[in-house]
């Protein structure tokens, strides 16, 4: 499939394995039938606020609040 | 009737005749003025003959202590119900990283040049000493892992740890994360966070410091180590548990370092998920026990205050009785 030195397409695009597996999980969750689907999509909500620090001071926080990781 | 009202107020005023220096205060104004007028030992301020023993102060304290007791009891129950929900999830998530530890081992003693100390703590307070314990462990790790050619940085989850670490080590903080528990904790959220961390820091070893939940009364500060893929490869060459990595057959035709990279990223995400869940459990358990001891203390305080109040009230009544009787006996000259 791929030669020894090539990396998978997603790695070449800059994604980590975590992102890749999350996308796959999202695809699987979207395949479910209705009553289970809404219950399971509720488990995908992301919310946190991240701020990097430079020289001892926090910069403006970035709020990651997607409802589902795409 | 008026006397009874005055006695209920805890004040006793002699007739205006005996107190030329004090303005006449009628009972209505006295009851209105009482809450804002705090006198702890009134005797020395009034001229002779006018006694007023105030139980108002004690009564106010009793009311506020009772309110505090109610609030802490309610907080304890809320924490108990949250703990019940999150505890099975934390215990189940332990199964996520156990295969990784079986495969890659947990090696806290591997020497790493760049250490990133990920401190997991809570956003809200009133949860006992768990946040200080985690920060203490993080500081010790920092001392252990800084030295010649070695660098250590902090990534802080939770406002409580951020406040404590920012006091002394603010130049070493790389990232700080807050508002983690606004939505119920789930794997997707933690993995997005793990992804952000991986993209923003360079590391040879990631050390996750959190509170492992043993029981409501005991939360142990724990450290989990994740090595970077390069370090894992180096270690596997030198033998030990990691040396057996080569004996595994790899499917998919990818190279070993590729696999190791995927594995370590996924391992980080799983261990972080478990760490955050365990810390949340410890937070609720510790809050339960802190609020419980707080309500118990409030109950003790209430008992002491009640005794004090009754003593004061009875002293006032006894004084009244003595005065009435001695007054009567003074009037009946042949007693």
Image (tube, grey):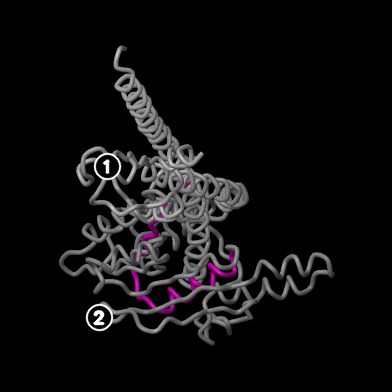
Apparent side of residue A30 relative to residue B320 in the rendered image (left or right): right
Task: Name the outermost residue toward the top.
Answer: B335
**Mark sitting on residue A4:** none
Q: Nearer the viewer, residue B283 or B294?
A: B294
Q: Tag count in the figure?
A: 2
* Subunit bearing disc 2: A
| Residue at numbered disc 2 | A55
Task: Name the outermost residue toward the left.
Answer: B148
Report how far apart the C-alphas of labels 1 and 2 lie in the structure.
73 Å
* Residues drawn in magenta: B186-214
Would you place residue A23 above or below residue B16 in this image? below
Label 1 or label 2, whichever lies nearer to me, is 1
Would you place residue B99 above or below residue B226 in this image? above
Apparent side of residue B308 relative to residue B100 in the rendered image (left or right): left
Q: Residue at x 36, y 40 (%)?
A: B12
Q: Quadrant of the N terminus of chain A?
A: bottom right
Q: Position of residue B265 (x, y in %)?
A: 49, 68
Q: Nearer the viewer, residue B120 or B288?
A: B288
Q: Quadrant of the C terminus of chain A?
A: bottom right
Apparent side of residue B35 relative to residue B114 in the rendered image (left or right): right
Task: Name the outermost residue toward the bottom.
Answer: A13
Look at the image and tell me whether residue B255 can be seen. no
Q: Residue at x 50, y 67 (%)?
A: B180
| Residue at numbered disc 1 | B18
Q: Position of residue A60 (x, y in %)?
A: 39, 84
Q: Position of residue B292 (x, y in %)?
A: 47, 41
Q: Nearer the viewer, residue A51 or B299?
A: B299
Disc 1 and disc 2 in contact, CB within 8 angstroms: no
Is B190 colored magenta in this rendering? yes
SS at mark 1 in the image: helix
* Subunit bearing disc 1: B
Q: Residue at x 38, y 25 (%)?
A: B321
């Amino acid at each position: 499939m791929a030669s020894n030195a090539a990396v998978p397409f997603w790695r070449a695009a800059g994604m980590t394995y975590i992102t890749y597996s999350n996308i796959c999980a999202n695809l699987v969750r979207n395949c479910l039938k209705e009553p289970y689907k809404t219950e399971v999509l509720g488990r995908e909500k992301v919310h946190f606020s991240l701020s990097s620090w430079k020289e001892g001071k926090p910069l403006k926080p970035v709020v990651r609040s997607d409802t589902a990781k795409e | 009737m008026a006397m009874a009202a005055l006695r209920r107020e805890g004040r006793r005023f002699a007739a205006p005749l005996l107190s030329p220096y004090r303005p006449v205060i009628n009972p209505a104004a006295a009851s209105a003025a009482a809450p804002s007028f705090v006198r702890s030992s009134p005797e020395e301020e009034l001229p002779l003959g006018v006694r007023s023993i105030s139980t108002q102060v004690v009564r106010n304290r009793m009311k506020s202590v009772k309110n505090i007791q109610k609030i802490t009891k309610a907080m304890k129950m809320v924490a108990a119900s949250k703990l019940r929900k999150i505890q099975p999830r934390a215990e189940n998530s332990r199964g996520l990283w156990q295969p990784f530890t079986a495969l890659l081992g947990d090696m806290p003693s591997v020497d790493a040049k760049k250490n990133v100390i990920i401190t997991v703590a809570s956003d809200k307070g009133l949860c006992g000493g768990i946040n200080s314990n985690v920060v203490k462990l993080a500081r010790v790790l920092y001392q252990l892992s800084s030295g010649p050619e070695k660098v250590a940085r902090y990534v802080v989850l939770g406002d409580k740890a951020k406040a404590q670490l920012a006091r002394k080590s603010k130049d070493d903080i790389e990232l700080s994360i807050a508002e983690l528990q606004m939505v119920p904790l789930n794997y997707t959220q933690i993995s997005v966070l793990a992804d952000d961390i991986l993209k923003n820091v360079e590391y040879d070893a990631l050390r996750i410091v959190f509170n492992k939940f043993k029981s409501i009364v005991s939360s142990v500060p724990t450290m989990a180590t994740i090595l970077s893929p390069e370090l894992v490869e180096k270690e596997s060459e030198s033998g030990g548990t990691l040396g057996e990595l080569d004996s595994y057959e790899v499917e998919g035709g990818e190279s070993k370092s590729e696999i190791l990279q995927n594995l370590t990223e996924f391992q980080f995400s799983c261990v972080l998920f478990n760490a955050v869940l365990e810390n949340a459990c410890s937070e609720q358990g510790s809050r339960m026990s802190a609020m419980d001891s707080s309500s118990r203390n409030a109950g003790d305080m209430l008992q002491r205050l009640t005794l004090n109040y009754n003593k004061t009230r009875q002293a006032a009544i006894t004084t009244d009785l003595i005065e009435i009787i001695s007054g009567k006996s003074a009037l009946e000259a042949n007693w």
